[in-house]
Image: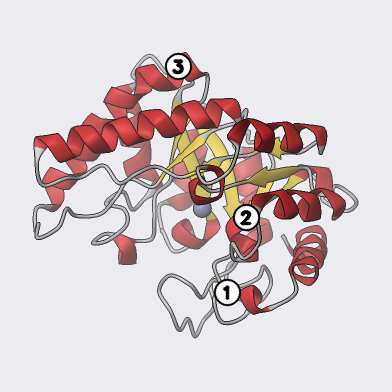
Amino acid sequence: MRNLQGRLDLCSINTATLGHREPISLTIERIARAGFGGIAPWRREIESADIAQVARQIKTSGLAVTGYCRSTALPAATPAEFNANVDANRAALRDAATLNAQCFVMVTGGLAAQSRDLPGARSQVTEGIAMLLETARDCGVPLAIEPLHPMYAADRAVVNTLEQALAICRAVDAANTGYVGVAIDAYHCWWDPALAHAIGTAGREKRILAYHTCDWLRDTRDMLLDRGMMGDGVIDLPALRQSVETAGYDGLIEVEIFSAQNWWQRDPDHVLATCAERLQTLC
Ligand code: ZN
């Protein structure tokens, strides 16, 4: 496993970690100044800004874009809505290309409104990703399917384990073109008894496109916005990174913390300094 001491260039900050409280230009500046090697911005920050200028600023700051967050939900109640969702993702993929993003993060979507059809939603996800693959190739930006913890199956993602995400990769891209893979997020995957096996498989299939880190707080108070800083929770983060890197992943380690009541209340530079320290000592 790589030693992260003095290697913040191997670490990236997902902008959600700072709570989206400031304009993206300032966020880029802070992350670069703190010494990180990468950034993962969100569409809400980019689509409301001058994307070419943002791309230039990121490039001149020397930051890699470890991912562009994130897809429009795919499952839909009608074919028209489904096609609109796919098109929205095509547009975002073009922006991901402008940003020179290493991948487009696919949070696939939960059940459509009023729906109880979980298998149907999962089929729509596979179909939608298959439809996006060509755009991904044209744009030169791979799709990174991010399985989410099963507590989000209703409202955010019907893809809930790494093995399930890999099965979709194989279904839509049997030839393994390199344009669809997985984003492994410690928060979503740590509980899975089949995780180590799935990470090994993902590595052999060369499908690991991103690795996201944070921690799971034992007394989680909010399903969405109470992620922990690395070291404050129960995940064996060094063991997890070791298994991801042993599987062949050599990309950046991306910190992604949603924390409305804690970290989003703190000074952004303090948050970044804490991430830096924890990454180098506890991850
Ligand atoms: Zn993530």
Secondary structure at numbered mark 1? loop
134 to 235, vertically: above or below: above
Q: Earlier in the sequence, mark 3 or mark 1?
A: 3
Image mark count: 3
Residue 276 in the figure: left or right of residue 142 = right
Amino acid on which the number 1 mark rests in the picture? Val
Q: Are marks 2 and 1 in contact (CB under 8 Å)?
A: no
Amino acid on which the number 3 mark rests in the picture? Arg
Q: Is residue 267 visible?
A: yes
The residue carrying mark 2 is 15
Secondary structure at numbered mark 2? helix
Quadrant assignment for the C terminus:
bottom right
Amino acid on which the number 2 mark rests in the picture? Thr
Secondary structure at numbered mark 3? helix
Label 2 environment density (alpha carbons within 10 Å; few <14, some 14–19, many ≥20): many
- Report, in whole angstroms, how far the alpha carbon at label 3 lies from the one at label 1: 38 Å
Q: What number is the disc on residue 145?
A: none
Q: Nearer the viewer, residue 83 or 7?
A: 83
Q: Nearer the viewer, residue 228 or 155?
A: 155
Residue 8 location (% of width, % of height): 82, 49
Residue 13 location (% of width, % of height): 68, 52
Q: Is residue 1 visible?
A: no
The residue carrying mark 1 is 234
Residue 223 location (% of width, % of height): 40, 74
215 to 266, vertically: above or below: above
The residue carrying mark 3 is 137
Label 3 environment density (alpha carbons within 10 Å; few <14, some 14–19, many ≥20): some
Tag nearer the camera, 3 or 1: 3
- Report, in whole angstroms, how far the alpha carbon at label 2 lies from the one at label 1: 23 Å
Q: Quadrant of residue 198?
A: top left
Q: Residue at x 65, y 71 (%)?
A: 229
Q: Residue furthest right?
A: 6
